[in-house]
Image: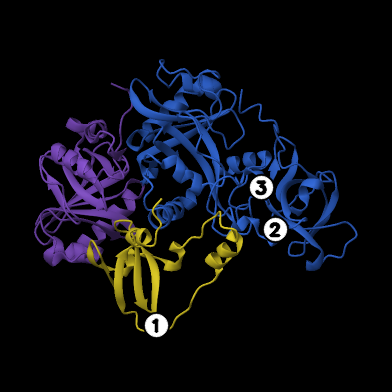
Amino acid sequence: MCKGLTSATFLNKIYCNAFGKLAVGKTRYGLMLREDGIAMDDGTAGRLAEDHFVVTTTTANAASVLRHMEFARQCLWPDLDVQLISTTEAWAQYAVAGPNARKLLEKVVDPEFDLSNEGFPFMACSNIKVCGGLRARLFRISFSGELAYEIAVPTRYGDAMIRELMQAGEEFEVVPYGTEALGVMRIEKGHAAGNELNGTTTALNLGMGKMVSKKKDSIGSILSEREGLKSEDALKLVGFKPVDPKNPVPAGSHLMTLGDPVDAAHDQGYVTSACYSPSLKCSIAIGYLKSGDARKGEIIRLVSPLTGFDHNVEVVSAHFVDPEGERLRA
Amino acid sequence: MHRLKAITALGGTEPRVDQHGPITLSEKSGFALASVAARVGGTKATTMAIKRLTGAPVPGPGQTNGTKITAFWTGPDQWMLEAPYNSHEKLFEQATAEVKGKASVTEQSDGWCRFDLQGEGLSAVMERLCAINMHNFEAGHATRTSIEHLGCFVICRTKTHISILGPRSSAGSLHHGLLIAIRSAY
Amino acid sequence: MIINHPILGPRDSAEFTYMGDAALLDRPDWQAKDALLQFIDYGYLRDNPAGPHTELWYHEQGDRSFLVITRDTTTHEISSVKLASDVARGRGRSK
């Protein structure tokens, strides 16, 4: 939670992309860099009022991001009007995802709130009421790539809320989904997670180089301009599909240009996240490849001396499923 | 009134009470919390607002004050308000109205679990749990420290009554730690 | 180690997180002509004194204040403790 009269100015310094003009009632994806230009964390920030943002982080980074923001607030910009407090524990938040997500929520959210695609479009956020008057928050954000919402209620009602959602969803055959399923869906979408934000990668590597605004002062912006981080053949996040669909594309494997010797000097990159994709009916993966964005369609050699894998994979876009994001906006 | 039923931080429908030796350990669920952080230039207005809400002088560092609504100091220019949930479910709205934009107010009622330790000889228990100097920790004192690696607020109501507020999702671990300390002491 | 917090008095160092050299307060001007070189110095160059060292400690399990502490690296004796926000203002970091 980030409040205060200059909270937008503050978030503009914390995130490398622009936040100053985010409209009230809207959420935006934000990328935080360390001062050395390496990606630190990503998440969304929703603007519930002119002076009130809800900042989300990777779950495991919540404490370290708050620490980083407190450092910026107290040590770097001590006279900005911004107040921070953790609200992680205060809300129980559920993702409701899939083509019937809106229909399900309409049974739970109080009728005075308009959930239509026009009334509550992709990336909207709002204070709402549910189940006959309970205060709640709704965010139309999606990590899974589906039409999705995240709904938050006071923690003491979290248990009752999930029961309510499951009951309301019975007619749509709703199922609980865990992080394993989410992990597959986010790879199919090419969404970065901890494996990609691994402490060595920049916005450029993630394919978000253009997001780093040069019109403002943000942490990490200047040092991300270092020569070594901007080389012509910098690693770029891409997708991989096995040439023989029976083969896996295991994470940790290294990538070699066909015909090159298999040694560190010729290393072209590595696989970060892999899964079997039920949508594509084969194993898929995302990872970093030198000049990867310019090599789509190339067949390269995947090697893993540790496990003995040695076969060819095709370089593809990391966005395997719904690359235009039509499901999100449905 | 909405149709959802609340559970306590330990997951029950009723708060849990444990008794061991001279000490009673009670889970508390009926409290509302709101944090108040003064905005730039708003310290005076914020302290006046807290005074109006609590009917008592604003607590300084390490202190708590108030009657129906109480406040305790949580950091430079920051306080937490606490009140009974039944009568003050809308503590957040009440405080927001009172500070008139001079402070940021945040709903915290569900962010914390609360356990109360009551009985003679609380020092022996507390000294096993944290680094607070129990020799001069008296009624009206409140501080944040680490208990079982969790950041907790410790509030001294009277010499025989201490409240511990910890992160709600770690309620089970905190409760276990408190029980172990009581059993160790007695 | 006991840290004499300027607001809260003596507190166990276990409540704090060490956050490195207090030179981190002196973040360069992003619009300076040689900003890149200045930021490289800011990011990577540290003194490593055997003796008094000025450093940041974060009262993470307390009131969340950042403190600027002068600690002798050979004895752990602490000779000065200040609120980092006050020090930052003193070094011209307002606005």
User: On screen, A284 above or below C42?
Assistant: above
Q: How is the image coloured?
A: by chain
In the depicted view, which residue is nearer to us: A298 or A29? Answer: A29
Q: Colour of chain C?
A: yellow
Residue B136, quarter of picture: bottom left
Mark 1 or 2: in front is: 1
- Label disc, if present, on residue C51 of the rendered structure: 1
A134, A70: nearer the viewer: A70
Q: State the purple chain.
A: B
Q: For the residue carrying disc 1, how many other residues have a C-alpha within 10 Å: few (<14), some (14-19), or many (20+)?
A: some
Relative to A62, is B122 on the left or the right?
left
Q: Residue at x 22, y 51 (%)?
A: B73
For mark 2, what is the residue? Answer: A252
Numbered label attached to residue A209: 3
Q: Mark 1: which amino acid?
A: Gly
Q: Chain of mark 2?
A: A
For residue B161, which numbered disc appears in the image? none
How far apart are labels 3 and 2 at the CA level? 24 Å
